[in-house]
Image (cartoon, rainbow, N blue to C red):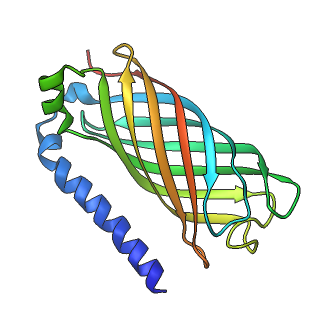
């Protein structure tokens, strides 16, 4: 029970930090920072302790809305179609996530100093649910896993509308016993609908 309280506290504290850090930037943001976006990624799922999975390829699709130049909210669907469990045999692992994406505003200073204007680092924080065809979570006792998901990544803006997205993230499966799922992915993101 203490572990769950610590997880909940860390999750709320992380959101509070992002909100406080971005408050000034958000209040000063122009309306032209708003837009919609869609994207797709491919990568690798790296299961940690507390589950009966092995690494596998994973694909994801997402859609989101940029509230300002510094903050976006997004929803994502994930699928790892060929996950092999330690118990023998395979299973399909799918999932959904809702998260906030916070652009690192401090990067602007680095950009001015070194001219890396196409790079755009970000932090994500949200919640995710994973669903498996077999009991592979919580040491083979659950078919579902819920918990916070957080990540670090960067965009490389190819054009004003098209970006390369690189990301590494971790999901805490907050069941008993707790487990971890890690992932690394690369993909493309297309933005549209911004104010001209």
Horizontal side of 62 relative to 120 (left or right) equals right
| Residue 142 rendering spot, x and y as whole percentages | 72, 71
Give the left or right position of residue 46, taking residue 11 as reference. right
Comparing 142 with 185, the one in front is: 185
Q: Nearer the viewer, residue 119 or 175?
A: 119
Q: How many marks?
A: 0
Q: Looking at the image, is 138 positioned above or below residue 96?
A: below
Q: Quadrant of residue 138?
A: bottom right
Residue at 38% x, 29% y: name it.
155
Q: Quadrant of residue 42?
A: top right
Question: Residue 89 location, x and y as percent?
Answer: 88, 55
Specify the farthest residue to the right: 89
Residue for point 37% across, 34% down: 154
| Rendered residue at 15%/41% (across/down) | 25
Asked if 51 appears above or below 110 in the picture, the reply is: below
Quarter-of-image position of residue 116:
top left
Q: Quarter of the image containing the C terminus? A: top left
- Residue at image coords 41%, 80%: 5
Horizontal placement of 186 versus 196: left or right? right
Q: Is residue 183 left or right of residue 20?
A: right
Image x and y of residue 40, in percent: 56, 30
The single residue placed furthest to the front in the displayed view is: 114
Percent position of residue 115, x then y: 19, 19
Q: From the viewer's side, name the closer residue of 8 and 110.
A: 110
């Amino acid at each position: 029970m203490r572990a769950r309280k610590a997880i909940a506290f860390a999750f709320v504290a992380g959101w509070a930090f992002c909100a406080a850090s971005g408050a000034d930037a958000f209040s000063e943001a122009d309306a032209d920072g708003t837009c919609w976006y869609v994207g797709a990624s491919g990568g690798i799922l790296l299961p940690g302790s507390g589950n009966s999975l092995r690494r596998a390829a994973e694909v994801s699709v997402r859609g989101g809305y940029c509230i300002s130049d510094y903050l976006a909210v997004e929803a994502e669907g994930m699928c790892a179609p060929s996950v092999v469990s330690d118990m023998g045999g395979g299973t399909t692992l799918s999932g959904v996530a809702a998260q906030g994406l916070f652009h690192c505003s401090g990067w602007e200073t680095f950009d001015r100093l070194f001219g890396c204007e196409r790079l755009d680092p970000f932090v994500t924080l949200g919640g995710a649910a994973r669903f498996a065809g077999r009991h592979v979570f919580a040491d083979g006792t659950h078919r579902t896993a819920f918990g916070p998901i957080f990540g670090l990544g960067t965009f490389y803006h190819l054009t004003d509308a098209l970006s390369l997205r690189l990301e590494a993230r971790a999901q805490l499966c907050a069941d008993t016993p707790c487990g971890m799922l890690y992932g690394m992915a690369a993909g493309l993101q297309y933005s549209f609908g911004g104010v001209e």
